[in-house]
Image: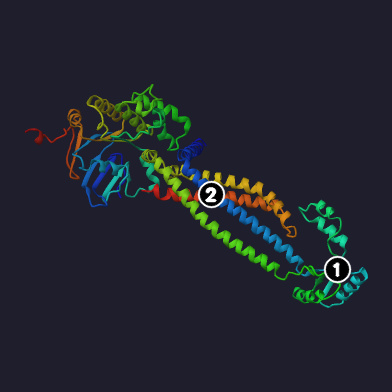
Amino acid sequence: MHRLWNRIDFAFSSAWQNFWRNAAVSVASVLIVWVVLLALGSLLLVLHSLDQIVAIEKTKASAISVYLADTTPLSSAMDFKLHLEQDPRVTNVAYVSKDQALARFRQLPALDPSVIDTLGTNPLPASLDVTVRDIRDLGAIDQEVRNSPLVDKSPATNYEPNVIDKIILLARVAGIAGLVLIVGLTGLSVFIIMLTIRTAIYLRRKEIEVMKLVGATDWFVRWPFIVEGLIVGVAGAAVAVLIVGFGYRPAVINLQSVLIFVPLAFDPSYLRIVLAAMLGFGLLLGSVGSYLGVRRFLKQ
Amino acid sequence: MATVTPAAPQISLDRVQKTYPNGTVALRDVTLQIPKQDFVFLVGPSGAGKSTLVRLLIREEKATAGTISVEGQDLSRLKRRHLPYLRRKIGMVFQDFKLLPNLTVFQNVGFALRVTEGALRHLKPKVEEVLSIVGLEGKENKYPDQLSGGEQQRVAIARALVHDPRIFLADEPTGNLDPATSWEIIQLLLQINARGTTVLMATHNREIVDVMRRRVVAIEGGQIVRDEDAGGYHAPALESH
């Protein structure tokens, strides 16, 4: 127990000294780790949000809202509903009145309801929400209903055939670009940590010589430098975790107020996973960088 | 495979050769046996191979050919991870002391115990014990640059003693010291030897070797040219003219 404690105490106090003796280089390596982890955390959260949006859009995919002109009387709307219900491709048609549409609109997250109240009138159209058996029929139905005089012209429906594909493509491009960036930054940060550790080894060369002479084991000599790498990893991770941890929610809220129709949500359980992954990756960068730093230089 | 008996020498070199990667032949066909508790001077001109021999004994270098055994262990077969445990049995001092300037006397000596994972509660009594052996009580909190050369070498000797080594290797320990101080260091080495530790001292110091009348092993050009009990720095034949 005493021996283990001695070993830990020696490794940590030496590592701490190394870190500060070599402060400029150490801070540079903390910064690069911080940048990598910030990029990693942001990428994971952005991809997760895109996933969420895709999932929600997919559930909507088999339905379109057909917007009715405000001039359409309710009886005509009901006839139109009946007409659509008789279509074999259609499984369900629901009528949504202007008031219901407004109520739904008020439910959108991050929307200030008083904005609508100041308009005085209800700008939202009534609609028929049409669900189809096979989503490939949506395009044809969209074409048909557009020609009806009952239907609003701006816009006629919410049919956007490529929206999911576009989001998936966006997620893929963002994922690949982010991955390339992170791989590059990871290589750079491991390299800089390795240089930091080599500088520390150089500054301690006399101690290392004496340690080997009096019979310290290789791992006893190495540990302080590995711990120094871990300190760099944790320090970089700590800053990045704080920024992402406290910044995610405000970022989501801000985006929700800009992209009101995008179903963007704050997901605290996923955030915790991301933060843990960032910390873990920081430790990994630190240990790999310092291992590479000690590997060659402490062999003889 | 010879078994190790109590009669076996503590240090044994058998037809040892050392050629450095650049082609320099430092030792050629060196055979030498040193029994327990012996006190041996290793003499010879600079570049004769004294330091190489010392480096081979702590396996800082590996022999190119021949076998070296220390404390019954064949050094060519010693695994790298077992090397630290060999080093703990061998105390080692150098001409340049190799003290750490940012540590006090106490810390310099304690360092050897700390980095070999000695239990910390034994550290203070052990350090005090070896500091009293070398006569440095009261200087525990001085830094190396506050000490004379002789005192610095005493710190180095104390550090080499914390593991109660069976073998004590001194490579030119008096090389940087004046004659009076050199004698003090020699007295200390004799005292260590009297406590049962084998001492091997590589030196240029002719006066000391001649006065001491101990075993002298002379190396020249990488070969042992003389091995005499109670010898002098030079062979008698050379001294007579």
Q: Nearer the viewer, residue B233 or B196?
A: B233
Q: Determine the image quadrant of residue B174.
A: top left
Horizontal arrangement in the rendering, residue A144 relative to residue B179 (left or right): right
Q: Determine the image quadrant of residue A140.
A: bottom right
Horizontal arrangement in the rendering, residue B233 relative to residue B97 (left or right): left
Between disc 2 and disc 1, the foreground one is 1
Horizontal arrangement in the rendering, residue A112 relative to residue B124 (left or right): right
Indicate the chain on which mark 1 is placed: A
Question: Which residue is label 2 attached to?
Answer: A33
Q: Which of A86 and B222 is in front in this view?
A: A86
Horizontal arrangement in the rendering, residue B114 relative to residue B1 (left or right): right
Q: Which of A121 and A134 is in front in this view?
A: A121
Question: Which residue is label 1 attached to?
Answer: A69
Q: Looking at the image, which residue sits at the far right?
A: A75
Residue B208: x %, y % from top left: 20, 29
- In the image, residue A292 above or below residue A96: above
Callout 1: few (<14), some (14-19), or many (20+) C-alpha neighbours within 10 Å? many
